Amino acid sequence: MAGSRAPTLSAIAGEAGVSVSAVSKVRNGGTDVAADTRARIARLLRQHGYQVASQTGFAVADLLIGCLDSPWSEELIRGAVEAAAEAEVSVIVTTVSSPAGFARWLDRASRRGTGGALCVLQLPGSQELQRLAAARIPLVVIDPPEEPGAAIRSVGTTNWQGGMQATRHLIELGHRRIGVIGTEAVWSGRARLAGYRAAMLEAGLDVDERMVRHDGLTAAGGRAQARRLLALPDAPTAIVAGNDSQAFGVLQALAERGLRAPLDVSVVGFDDVPVASWATPALTTIRQPLAAMAAAAFRMLSGDLAAVADEPHHLELATSLVIRDSTAPPRGR
């Protein structure tokens, strides 16, 4: 364990006002210590540099994610679970979508112990970071909603390049009136929209702000904004969506008008979730390596903490264009 300067278990027992046996049980993941007492002992052990085993009795890490009912979430969970299994670590998945939810999770994790947390689309504030540090719980953020500072390790993808790739593909097919649906609510969404603008300007095409729409990254959001784009007098011949869910909504809006992709309007998504290839037509999209992102985050989390200073604090995995059946040259070309 710790070096010679660390207090003995007897000293920690005296500080906590409990027996040495209780301290030993908490350190080794025993379950027969009252929750409040366990939390007090675990806090003292970590403060003095001791590793505290999970109360479950086996190695665990936590994955915190906003929702469980989407192909996007399923891919992230799969990547984390598979990487953890290789290290003989179990993953506890918790839905966390707010600072209050994060605080509730942290209370539980501090009592039972954890090897660290993978946090999806949640960027803890300064108070949460202080609590994590006090509990000696390492953290890696996956797809951070804002640009993280140097104090937070994170994993994302090349969102700007992905947005540019999607738009370039349509330009190369001959499209000039290209609409885009995205979101400015998160860092990745803003980067994808910026990539769209960069590709348009690179090709010498003006960005018509009527063609730039913002909404939630859902099929409903894509459908609502596609309706508005298709109602324009000079409607787009192609649409870049902020993610695959929005792209599915675009396909729904086309069907409502008796239109088809790619004959009438080409459509590009972003993510390449498994169902993208099952759509009719199969969706051209930007592949975001979701499972690989989660696996990389787990390996960053479980790496040698002494080497953290030499690791990148924000790692970006490459996106790639997957061409399927939803894009083609505009009609008449």
Image: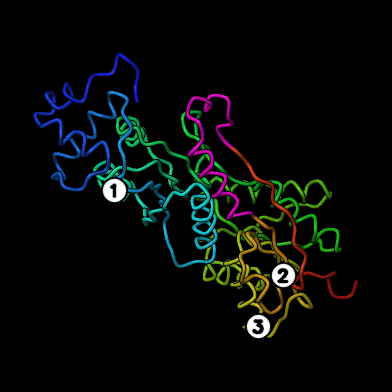
Examine the rendered structure and indicate whether residue 53 appears above or below residue 312: below
Residue 10: where, in percent of width, then height? 16, 24
Front one among 301 and 212: 301
Residue at 62 percent of width and 83 percent of height: 256
Q: Amino acid at mark 1?
A: Ala
Residue 55: where, in percent of width, then height? 27, 46
Q: Which residue is mark 3?
A: 257
Front one among 292 and 167: 292
Instruction: Give the secondary structure at mark 1.
Output: helix
Residues tagged 3 and 1 counted as in contact (Cβ below 8 A): no
Q: Which residue is mark 2?
A: 235
Residue 120: where, in percent of width, then height? 46, 50
Most extreme residue toward the bottom, as rendered? Answer: 258
**For residue 187, which quarter of the picture?**
top right
In front: label 2 or label 3: 3
Residues tagged 2 and 3 counted as in contact (Cβ below 8 A): no
